[in-house]
Amino acid sequence: MIEFVRGLGTVRARKMIEASTGMLLLAFCVEHVLGNSMLLLSDPGPYRWYTETMGRMLLIRIAEVALFGLFAVHIAVGLYMRWQHMTFMRSHPEKRPKQTLSTRLVGWTGAVILIFLVIHLERFFLRHRFAEEGTPPDVYVMAHEAFASPWYTAFYILCMVALASHLHHGIRSAFFSFKFVPPSMVPRVRSAVARVGLITPLLLGYIALHICVMHLLSR
């Protein structure tokens, strides 16, 4: 047990934890796209059935707790690794590697995503899950009212662009940590996952933009 705890303190273990939690969160984003796509339907029935069913299932409630745990671990480990990297670079500026734009911005995009999570969870998850006794708020209506605002939609799309950039950096880094992927397969697998990581937040942004435009046209 002691050796296991010590192992978690190594750079390699932290990179593996960050990569694994990031991939699980990407899987959640894909599921979120599938669910949110029902917001594009004029009939709110399917989306209401989806949210009500998800809210009643014990397994989903357990998954929600696990999801918050994943976010907490991913953020905490990411902040610690970022602090370590910045400290090392200050002491060894000559070892500063060449970085892509997404890598240089990873700290900023992570901060934007964290701010977005707080606002988005308060606006949707907390208001729905912890509503006062009686009929809980209609998430379909809540989403359409939120995205009817050009300002909130613009903020949402900006955050999805930040998420796409963050995922681009994370996916590139993750496959250096996943030693179980055969080296010959790394380029193909990384390319495929990178496409998912790019398309997923862009689709979420498109859903918000579509709802906003439809509301503006209907005025």
Image (cartoon, helix red, strand yellow):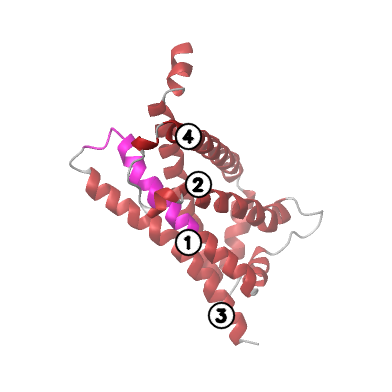
The image quarter containing residue 91 is: top left
Q: What amino acid is found at the position of numbered circle 2 in the picture? A: Gly
Which residue corresponds to mark 1? 161
Toward the top, the furthest residue is 2
Q: Earlier in the sequence, mark 1 or mark 2?
A: 2
Viewer-closest of 132 and 149: 149
Viewer-closest of 147 and 79: 79
Q: What are the residue bounds of the magenta stretch?
A: 161-182
Q: Are marks 4 and 3 in contact (CB under 8 Å)?
A: no
**Residue 45 visible to the viewer:** no
Nearest to viewer (mark 2 / mark 3)? 2
Q: CA distance from mark 2 to mark 3?
A: 32 Å
Which residue corresponds to mark 4? 81
Q: Secondary structure at mark 1?
A: helix
Q: Earlier in the sequence, mark 1 or mark 4?
A: 4
Which residue corresponds to mark 3? 213
How many residues crowd around disc 1 within 10 Å: few (fewer than 14), some, or many (20 or more)?
A: some
Q: CA distance from mark 1 to mark 2?
A: 14 Å
The stretch drawn in magenta includes residue 127: no
Q: Secondary structure at mark 3?
A: helix
